[in-house]
Image (tube, grey):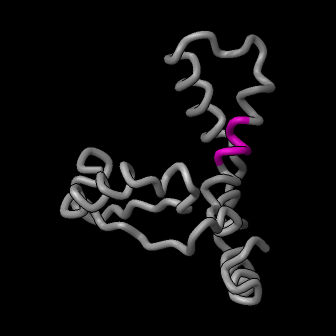
Amino acid sequence: MSIVHSNGLGQFQQDNATPRASRVATKWLQEHSFDFRHFHWPPKSPEMNIIEDIRDALLHDVEKRSPPPRTPMDLLTALQDSWCEFPPGYLQTPVESMPHRFASLLCARGCPT
C-alpha cells in the first residue's frame, strides 16, 4: 500500500469472503491497520465489488491472446496491454452501477442479490 499510495490516501477493500475473513487474515489486518485505511464492506457481498468485473474482463482478454503469455513478464505485459485497450469510459459503467448495486443489497438485507 505504501508503494502504490505513497501519499497515504489508499484504502484496502475486501469482500469479506470466508477465506479472506479468516482469523489469520483478520489478525493481520488489525496488526497492520496503521499502514492503511480499511474500507469496511458488507459481509460476503461480491456483487458490490466492481473490481471483480474489471478483473474478469482483463482475464478474458488475456485468455484470448495468441500466443498465450508464458512467463510472469509476458502476463504482466498482456494485462497492461489489455488495460490500455479498454475503450474510453469503460470504467464509468461499473462505477455508475453502484447506486443500483447498493439498493439491491439493501433490499436483500446484505444477502446475495
**Residue furthest front in the image:** 23
Left or right, 39 with reference to 89? left
Point 72% across, 50% down: residue: 87
Q: Position of residue 93 (x, y in %)?
A: 72, 66
Up/down of 44 relative to 54, above or below: below
Point 53% across, 26% down: residue: 76
Count of numbered labels shown in the rendering: 0
Question: Which image quadrant for residue 53?
Answer: bottom right
Point 24% across, 62% down: residue: 33
Kindly report the secondary structure that dominates the magenta region of the rendered protein: helix
Residue 18 lies in the magenta stretch:
no
Question: Which image quadrant for residue 10?
Answer: bottom left
Q: Which residue is at the front of the view, 19 or 103?
A: 19
From which residue to which does the magenta span run?
55-59
- Location of the C terminus by quadrant is bottom right
Q: Position of residue 65 (x, y in %)?
A: 76, 21
